[in-house]
């Protein structure tokens, strides 16, 4: 495995080059390049229909891009055979929007699915790991034996996260993790992601609409505009003079978050 | 590389332990990769760890661990807890900074968290299940009866004020459940006619009574099979469609929206469907009767050399108008039951998409069950009045 290096020496875990995505006549991405570095939390933002979720689905292999290359851990994803592909997918975890838990299984059984499918661990070790993941994601004890339909939206997301983390992935993909949560729940989820990414050394690729999340936990932000991405820290992006980016960060909601941050900084 | 692990590239350089005993102190040096792929052998090795009675203190030396994930950290934590249980003083030494957050994380884990529900006694379970199913059955019957009552009242209102009836959906459902069902109903009835004639012919030939195949066919098709087959096909085809349509609307809160706009879902959704089916099912039943007889006639000609005119003559002497009417009178009743159950199950859908599937299955099973039960009741009633 050749570890690709970015310009400033950080290891690049996801490298997208010349990506083109087309649905019929509609071009979603065109000559899109993106590097995700090891250990960073990257927020991906963009207007509705700009192809944020499409980009995520292409990286994790649920969609095939029209042209271009995607390399994860230095391995070209379209050049892998079945076995290599399965080995690669075991190195990342995905949290879908509403958790995407298997509705016929309890939370504990959901977390055990990847453990039982992809590893051969003794039964009681599997149970221990299940307990660890469930408590790591901040779910209460009783959640283990509940079915997804018996849980609230926030708890389902946490359970989905526990399943995504079951195999100790190196990359965590999140599709709008705070959508549909109340502000308190969303902030708690942000904290959870930040804490886990620090203690587990995760690289996080997060598609989001939530300006608070961007400010709170992202090291860098990728903005999808004009079929390409612009990646930078949030401070630098806010200085850019692109109409969409300006509206996004300096619109009424963006200003509110900014004002909150400055106030917090002044108070702290 | 451990061949029995499903995960490929991370399996090189497995973890290892080396216990060293020095009088009262036990030092366990841990090294290598303490990660998920090599966890199974490590787990076994750690469980075999024996301490002799002289040992008072144990130190887990983590200095030579290259990589660690949650599983590795847990194995260390579990071993430490295990040794403490045996009455030893346990300490961790030389943990690397980057491994510390993980070790702190697993330190908080409580093992009393229940992962699965305790399994109850099998016999109790069976009794429980049977009891629940019985209650469910009677509750369902009562609820369906209540729904029937409500429908009667609402239909009464529509009869008083015919303008409440919605004609566009009525026409739409007549097309959907009637016209579009003709090919499948026709094909299946035709085949039933063929099969019945052929089976009858081979049996009756033994007695030299081939011509009575026509009697068998005429009575069986007109009195029972034509309508019954049609009703079963329509229950599977249109009853399930009603449940799925209304159920999907329920999931997407369209029914709630309707009520807030002052529209009655029974008027808008249920009554047009019921009326449409009550119109189409008798027509389809008649169509099925004719096609089944046609299939039988064809088979009689091929297998028994009975010409069409012979067939018609024999048919005329074998059956009378009553045979047809006895069959046809059941059609509107079946139609009402199928449409009512379909709509009722659709309105019973709650929340999830999964529930749409469950209620649709329920709807088909229930309506076929009711159709056959009612058919049996009709037979008894007809035999009592001597038809």
Image (cartoon, coloured by chain):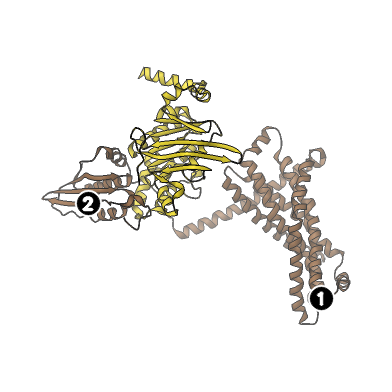
Q: Could you tell which of marks 2 and 1 lies nearer the N-terminus?
A: 2
Chain where mark 2 sits: B
Location of the N terminus of chain B by quadrant is: bottom left
Instruction: Specify whether residue B377 is in view.
Output: no
Q: Residue at x 71, y 59 (%)?
A: B232
Q: Nearer the viewer, residue A219 or A35?
A: A35
**Front position among marks 2 and 1:** 2
Q: Nearer the viewer, residue A227 or B16?
A: A227
Labels 2 and 1 share a subunit = yes
Q: Is residue B124 above or below residue B262?
A: below
Q: Nearer the viewer, residue B203 or B302?
A: B302
- In the image, farthest residue toward the left: B23
| Percent x, y of residue A29 | 53, 36
Q: Is residue B173 above or below residue B299?
A: above
| Percent x, y of residue A94 | 45, 42
Q: Residues within 10 Å of mark 2 (few under 14, many from 20)?
A: some
Disc sitting over residue B294 in the figure? none
> The chain shown in yellow is which?
A
Disc sitting over residue B212 in the figure? 1
Colour used to depict chain B in the structure image = brown
| Residue bearing the label numbered 2 | B17
| Percent x, y of residue A2 | 35, 45
The Cα–Cα distance between marks 2 and 1, rounded to whole angstroms, is 89 Å
Q: Residue at x 71, y 58 (%)?
A: B233
């Amino acid at each position: 495995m050749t570890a690709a290096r970015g310009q400033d020496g950080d290891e690049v875990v996801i490298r997208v080059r010349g990506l083109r995505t087309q649905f019929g006549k509609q071009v979603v991405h065109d000559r899109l390049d993106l590097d995700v570095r090891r250990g960073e939390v990257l927020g991906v933002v963009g207007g509705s229909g700009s192809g944020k979720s499409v980009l995520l689905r292409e990286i994790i292999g649920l969609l095939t891009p029209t042209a271009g290359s995607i390399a994860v851990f230095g391995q070209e994803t379209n050049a892998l055979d079945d076995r290599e592909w399965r080995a690669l997918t075991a190195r990342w975890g995905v949290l879908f929007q509403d958790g995407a838990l298997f509705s016929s299984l309890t939370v504990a059984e959901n977390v055990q699915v990847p453990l039982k499918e992809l590893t051969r661990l003794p039964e009681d070790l599997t149970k221990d790991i299940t307990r660890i993941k469930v408590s790591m994601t901040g779910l209460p004890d009783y959640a283990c034996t509940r079915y997804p339909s018996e849980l609230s939206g926030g708890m389902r997301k946490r359970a989905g996260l526990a399943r995504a983390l079951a195999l100790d992935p190196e990359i965590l993909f999140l599709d709008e993790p705070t959508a549909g949560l109340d502000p308190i729940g969303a902030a708690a989820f942000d904290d959870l992601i930040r804490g886990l990414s620090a203690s587990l050394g995760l690289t996080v690729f997060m598609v989001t609409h939530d300006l608070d999340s961007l400010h709170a936990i992202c090291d860098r932000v990728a903005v999808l505009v004009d079929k390409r991405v612009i990646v930078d820290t949030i401070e630098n992006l806010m200085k850019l003079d692109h109409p969409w980016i300006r509206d996004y960060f300096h619109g009424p909601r963006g200003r509110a978050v900014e004002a909150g941050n400055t106030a917090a900084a002044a108070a702290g | 590389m451990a061949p029995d692990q499903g995960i490929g590239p991370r399996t090189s350089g497995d973890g290892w332990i080396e216990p060293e005993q020095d009088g009262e102190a036990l030092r366990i040096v841990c090294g290598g990769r303490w990660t998920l792929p090599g966890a199974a052998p490590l787990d076994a090795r750690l469980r075999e760890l024996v301490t002799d009675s002289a040992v008072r203190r144990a130190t887990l030396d983590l200095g030579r661990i290259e990589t660690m994930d949650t599983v590795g950290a847990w194995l260390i934590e579990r071993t430490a807890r295990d040794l403490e249980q045996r009455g030893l003083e346990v300490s961790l030494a030389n943990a690397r900074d980057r491994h510390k957050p993980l070790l702190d994380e697993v330190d908080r884990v409580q093992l009393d968290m229940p992962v699965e529900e305790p399994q109850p006694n099998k016999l109790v379970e069976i009794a429980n299940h049977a009891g629940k199913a019985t209650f469910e059955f009677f509750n369902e019957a009562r609820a369906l009866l209540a729904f029937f009552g409500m429908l009667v009242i609402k239909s009464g209102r529509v009869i008083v004020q015919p303008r409440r009836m919605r004609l566009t959906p009525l026409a739409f459902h007549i097309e959907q459940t009637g016209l579009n069902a003709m090919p499948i109903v026709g094909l299946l009835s035709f085949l039933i006619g063929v099969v019945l004639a052929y089976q009858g012919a081979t049996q009756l030939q033994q007695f030299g009574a081939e011509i009575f195949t026509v009697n068998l066919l005429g009575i069986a098709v007109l009195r029972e099979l034509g309508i019954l087959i049609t009703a079963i096909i329509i229950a599977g085809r249109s009853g399930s469609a009603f449940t799925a349509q209304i159920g999907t609307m329920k999931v997407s809160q369209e029914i709630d929206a309707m009520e807030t706009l002052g529209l009655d879902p029974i008027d808008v959704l249920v009554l047009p469907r019921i009326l449409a089916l009550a119109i189409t099912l008798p027509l389809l039943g008649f169509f099925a009767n004719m096609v089944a007889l046609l299939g039988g006639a064809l088979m009689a000609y091929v297998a028994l050399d009975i010409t069409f005119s012979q067939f018609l003559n024999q048919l005329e002497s074998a059956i009378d108008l009553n045979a047809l009417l006895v069959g046809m009178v059941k059609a509107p009743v079946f139609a009402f039951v199928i449409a009512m159950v379909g709509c009722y199950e659709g309105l019973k859908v709650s929340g999830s998409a999964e529930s749409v599937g469950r209620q649709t299955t329920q709807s088909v099973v229930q309506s076929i069950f009711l159709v056959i039960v009612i058919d049996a009741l009709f037979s008894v009633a007809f035999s009592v009045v001597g038809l």
